[in-house]
Image (cartoon, rainbow, N blue to C red):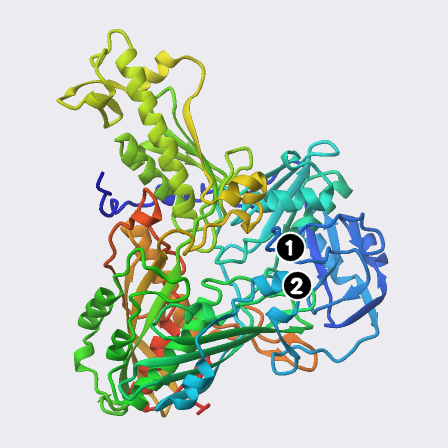
Amino acid sequence: MAQPTDGPATTRIDGIAKVTGRADYSADAVPEGLAHAVLVDATIARGKISRLDATEALKAPGVLAVLTHENAPALKKASAFPMGAAGHRRRPLQDARILYRGQHIAVVVATTREAARHAASLVRVTYQDEAPPEATLATGETKRMADLDFLSRAMSGDSHRGDPEAALATAPLVVDAVYTTARTYHAAMEPHATLAWWEGKDRLVVREGSQWVDGAQDTLAAWFGLKRDHVRLLSAFVGGGFGSRIAVYPHAALAALAAREVGRPVKLVLERAQVFLAVGNRPAIRQRVRLGADPSGKLTALVHESANETSRDSIYSEPGSRASVSTYTVPHYRAENSVAALDIPPPGWMRAPGEAPGSFAVESALDELAQKAGVDPLALRVLNHADADAHSGKPWSSRKLREAYALGAEVVGWSSRAAAPRSRREGHEWIGLGMATASYPSRQLPAEARVGVSRDGRVYVESRGVDIGQGTYTALAIVAAEVLGVAPAQVDVRLGDTRLPRSAMAGGSMLTRSLGTAVHGAATSLRDTLLDLARRTKGSPVHGRKRAALGVREGRVVALDAPSEGLDFAAIAAAWGDTPLAAFHRTHPTVLSRITGAMAFTSPAGIRTESAGDASIHSWGAQFAEVAVDEELGRIRVRRLVGVFDCGRILNPTAARSQMIGGMTMGLGMALMEGGHVDPRTAKLVNGDLGEYLVPVQADVPPIDVFFVGEPDPAAGPLGSKAVGEIGITGVAAAIANAVYNAIGHRARALPIDLRNS
């Protein structure tokens, strides 16, 4: 059976609820008796609390409780990633040690948020054993992930093939350069918030914006020693995730702890400055890339060494080599990834972790190689195009990268690009064009879904998967609608509740493929049931027909040779009786996921990697940028971005295009604006708010053109769709940096780009 082409360009079915204010976010509810919690954070980076005085805070009007390490109930251990979803290994308020500035050291609970904030300002803290912090990548001791422990070695991302050192020693052309990317932070529209209450002593309900409700449920249950099904997590709408809501962080534990202490619902909303410190961020990364090539620019060797800052609390690695391990044909390759444990908050995932900073380094180095070889940068990439995955030794499942190069070059006007810098000037500005390759692996996790027909004939989809803004509600409606012959508007999608079937996380660009496959399976089973019920229903226009002679159209079971004859879904549901007319489907994409059962939904145990099958499955893209540089003002202005992508079948072109525009905008911010500035004496983040931490606003964002050149990928399952969400950011920073070089001959090896650094 031929796979369908791209799905219909569909307006988001949750859009009206969002623009009218009916969408129900975590902090929106105001249950009876609601109390508010405000956190007190450490003001040193390394040491111990010698005295914490909450006397004045407890006397303040409206205060219900102040929890500290001296009176907080014990929390049990919860597994951190990859074995679980706890964002930090260390539990909050369990001892007096301070491991980073911004660590939560007290929580004040009051009848109003204003009262809680005032009381929090009255908590007095003195410290002892303060030591000068190690707070930047330059100050910490770097250690290879592979040398730390077994789990770190398994996750290190190290790789080796051939003899790269020997190949570099004899290569006619060599590039050896170091590239750095600054610490960058999450700034999603919705601040992180938790609303928690207890139903009796052993049942906890939590409203939490989450990318992984199964993981959050499991972690909360572990912290409080509860049965998993005694924790209900609700996450119907999420105002942006980008990796910051995959794990569940200490503030959620403190909200639930406070709710149990005061015996009423408690809402805890992080202030924007706390979001910068409390929910992970992309760490600063230093990458050394060495390339060896023949005189034509054909790669013979590639060595990619990456080191990132991490915390003493939770070791986090972000291997830049994810962007280099298989993208190009290179016979001799080595990757090593290291970390430096510092006195900083634990970093974590941020859109395309590894691939985003890694692509900046590798794609910049390739541009430097093109300049040394005297060849066009695009031609160099075509010359080194990989016809198979050298890392796994398997063929690509599909790869329309050459087509992406060609279309992007045509749209951006690459043929008119001058090879030499400082060749094109308009007024006070030099104009340059740059490009880079984008790639991202397509993986799959276990997922469950229920698809049914309600008494009024409408189709519904249920799963505890979430929509973090990427369009899951609409994508799942499209999948069910296609199978059941209805319009997406006739499908009700219910998400983000742990009372529903289990789901994969919304991370790693895996959710649509993972959960969509489960929805497709459930919808297919339901369709077969509807066909059988219709042909067995006496008096039905299709009674007695064979199943093969029937189909579904416009909410009816019809005869294929006479579509006007049929029985609508409402009639079938009514005849079915009081039992829900629904089908359930579970996908376990690996043997391990079937063996581990529930654990496959609360850890990466069940993940099917990109090269687990007979082919290697990746999404591909080509990023192009045009910049204008005013050297007198030191200003870089991006005039145009063009992205062309192969992501397999596109379920919803409208949402997919929006995802790419968002990712490319984040790549622009990464290239030119975003960077945390840390005072090395105190470890204080000096620009930890949206007043001084710069992100692109409307005036900064140029016209962005997005195109798709892929086709349904059979290896990606019945949907034929590959990863979409994160590939949009990959390659953008490098394309901009390469365009700056083309404009003025300035080679930017540090992000964000500063023309004062040469």
State the mark number for residue 314: 2
Dot 2 lies on which element? Answer: loop
Q: What is the quadrant of residue 309 in the picture?
A: bottom right
Q: Is residue 629 at all visible to an observer of this figure? A: no
Question: Around disc 1, counting alpha carbons within 10 Å, would you say few (fewer than 14), some (14 to 19), or many (20 or more)?
Answer: some
Establish if 296 lies above or below 676. below
Any mark on residue 631, and which? Answer: none
The image shows residue 224 at horizontal and vertical percentages of 73, 43
**Secondary element at image label 1:** loop
Residue 303 visible somewhere in the drawing? yes
For mark 1, what is the residue? Answer: 80
Q: Residue at x 46, y 56 (%)?
A: 508
Q: Residues within 10 Å of mark 2 (few under 14, many from 20)?
A: some
- The residues tagged by marks 1 and 2 sit, at their Cα atoms, a distance apart of 8 Å
Mark nearer the N terminus (1 vs 2) = 1
Residue ranking furthest to the top: 538
Give the residue at the far left of this rendering. 561
Percent from the top left, x then y, of residue 360? 41, 75
